[in-house]
Amino acid sequence: MQLFSRLFLTLVILCACSILYILICPYFCLSLCWLGCRHPEEQEGVLPAGPGAAQFEGYISVPDGKPLARVPCRQCAVVSSSGQMLGSRSGKEIDEKECVLRMNQAPTQGYEEDVGGRSTIRVVSHTSIPLLLRNQSYFFKQSRDTIYVIWGPTRLMSREKVGLVYRTLLKVKEMYPSLHLYTLTDQMMVHCDELFLLETGKNRMKSGSFLSTGWFTMVLAMELCEQIFVFGMVSENYCRDRIQPTVPYHYFEKGELDECKMYLTHERAPHGGHRFITEKAVFSRWAKKRNIVFTHPSWPDG
C-alpha cells in the first residue's frame, strides 16, 4: 500500500512540475527553458540546421569553433569574379540555383543582370578582409543570410595565439553578432595543400606559390553540392589563344588589369604567385569525375 502511495505522490509532483514549466517558460527565460524560449534568429552565430543537415568539420565558426552545419545543396552556382561575367546576362540563371557561392569582395549590387543578387556563401582570402571592411554596411549589415568562410595562413589565422587576421574577425563578430563567420581549420588548410600536391605532383610551398580563393571555393563546393555550375571561369588553354578578346581581371574593376595577362604572369612567377592555369587544369579533371559544368564561357570537355 505504501508503495502505491509513493508512486501516486511521485506522479502528482511530476504533473505539477510539468504544468509549472509550461506556465512559466513563455514569460521567463529561466535557465531550464532558455533554449526553448529563444527564437532561432536570436541565437547568435547559429545557423538553423534543419532536417538532413550535415556537419562540415573543416570549417569552424568564430569565435566558438563549432563546425559548419547546413543542409547540402542539390545545385550550386560558383560565380567567378572574372570580367567574363560582364554581358553574360547570367543573373537569373545564377539566382535560380539552390546555393550561390561567391568570392572575396565581388559585389552584386549594380551587376545583378550578369551575376545575380543572391549570396549563400562567400569564400574570402585573408588579404581581402580590409576590402570588405571598407563597405561593412553592404557586406556585413545587409548580407545577414550569407555565410562567410575566411582562409589564410596559420600565423595570421591562429585562434590560440590570436593571429592578426583572427583578431580582426573577432572584432567584426563583436560588431555584427548575427554574422555567420567561419574559418578553415588547420587540418583543412593542410588538406588543400595535399590535394594540390596529389593533383599536380608539385609541393605548393616549395614551388613558391599560393592557392587561390577559387581553389578553396571549389573544394568547399564539391563537399557541399551535388551539382556545380561554374560561371565565368576560363579553361586552362583559354589564355593561350591570342584571338581571345581582352577582359578585365575582375568584372567590377573595369580597365584595371587584363585577365589573361594576370593569369600568365602569376603562372610564370618564380615565387609568390597563384597558379591559376594549373588549378584550372585540375578543375577540368575534377569535372570528368564529378557533376561540374562550366558556362560563360563553356569548356571544351567540361
Image: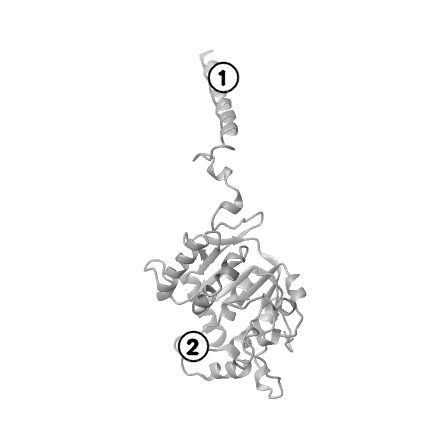
C-alpha span from label 2 to label 1: 74 Å
Q: Earlier in the sequence, mark 2 or mark 1?
A: 1
Q: Amino acid at mark 2?
A: Ser
Residue 106 position within the rendered picture, expressed as x and y whole percent measured from the top left: 54, 68
Q: Is residue 27 left or right of residue 163?
A: right
Task: Return the x and y of residue 46 as percentages of the image width and height.
Answer: 49, 49
User: In percent of the image, x 49 and y 25: which residue is there?
Assistant: 20
In the image shown, does 111 or 243 lie closer to the viewer? 111
For the image, the number of numbered tags is: 2
For the view shown, which residue lies furthest in the top direction? 1
Q: Nearer the viewer, residue 166 or 276?
A: 166
Where residue 8 is drawn, which disc sits there?
1
| Vertical arrangement, residue 34 with respect to residue 54, above or below | above
Residue 234 percent coordinates (x, y)? 59, 77
Labels 2 & 1 near each other (Cβ < 8 A):
no
Question: Disc 2 designates what residue?
Answer: 209
The residue that appears at 57% across and 53% down in the rendered structure is: 71
For disc 2, the neighbor class at 10 Å (few under 14, some 14 to 19, many from 20) is: some
Q: Secondary structure at mark 1?
A: helix
Amino acid residing under circle 1: Phe
Q: Is residue 236 above or below residue 228?
A: below
Mark carried by residue 84: none
Viewer-proximal residue among 299 and 77:
77
Mark 2 falls on what kind of element?
Answer: strand
What color scheme is it?
one colour
**Crowd rating for badge 1 (residues with CA inside 10 Å; few <14, some 14–19, many 20+):** few
